[in-house]
Image (tube, helix red, strand yellow):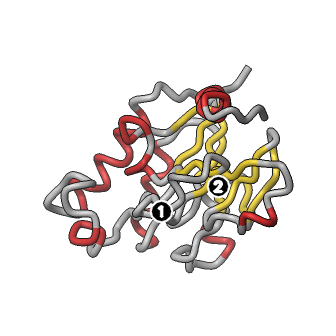
Amino acid sequence: MSSVLFVGDFHLGHKSILKLQQGVRPGYTIDQHDNWVVNQCLSVGPNKRTLWYILGDVSMEISSLERINELPGEKILVMGNHDKFETQTYLKYFKRIVGGIKKYGIWITHIPIHPQELLEKVNVHGHCHNNSLKNDPRYLNASIEWLPKQKPISLDQVRSLFRERGISI
């Protein structure tokens, strides 16, 4: 059985992220930042059978996309508002590219879905670097800086977190 991991908002190659997320994301240089992102992902023990859902805003520079190859397994990119390259560019690194997907009883998106559209589902999303939806138990912000220990989260962990909130999926 393969593992399923969720994580978003890598912002590889994004020089401004160092200022925007100062004190939240470590690193004084973009190389230090990008190394931290990749190492956080590798620290959860992925293998060639891992299925990654990368929840948008993966890289600001085409050259930084190469770092995605360091993550073993299959990768699905859920497009984010900063994912600006041609589809063919992303397909060199990702098995699939989606705008959002409903899987495992979860809406998996970059930008959170409007509450009226959840339709008795929950939403694992990125985009909100300030974790503004933390008071609504139907949402889980998977931006790397808001995940437990700032590491990708497994499907089992997602299910457990929602169960703790009284929501079964």
Which kind of residue does numbered mark 1 sit on?
A: Ser
User: Residue 44 placed where, x, y %?
Assistant: 45, 28
Please give the name of the residue rendered at 64% of the width and 55% of the height, measured from the top-left corner: 94
Distance (Cα) linking label 2 and label 1: 29 Å
Relative to residue 114, is residue 158 drawn left or right? Answer: left
The quadrant in which the N terminus is found is top right
Residue behind mark 1:
132
Circle 1 residues within 10 Å: few <14, some 14–19, many ≥20: few
Please give the name of the residue rendered at 39% of the width and 30% of the height, measured from the top-left corner: 43
Which kind of residue does numbered mark 2 sit on?
A: Phe
User: Residue 122 placed where, x, y %?
Assistant: 73, 48
Residue 94: give its label: 2
User: Residue 14 placed where, x, y %?
Assistant: 34, 71
Q: Is residue 165 above or below residue 140?
A: above
Please give the name of the residue rendered at 50% of the width and 48% of the height, measured from the top-left corner: 69
Please give the name of the residue rendered at 70% of the width and 65% of the height, measured from the top-left corner: 113
Q: Are marks 2 and 1 in contact (CB under 8 Å)?
A: no
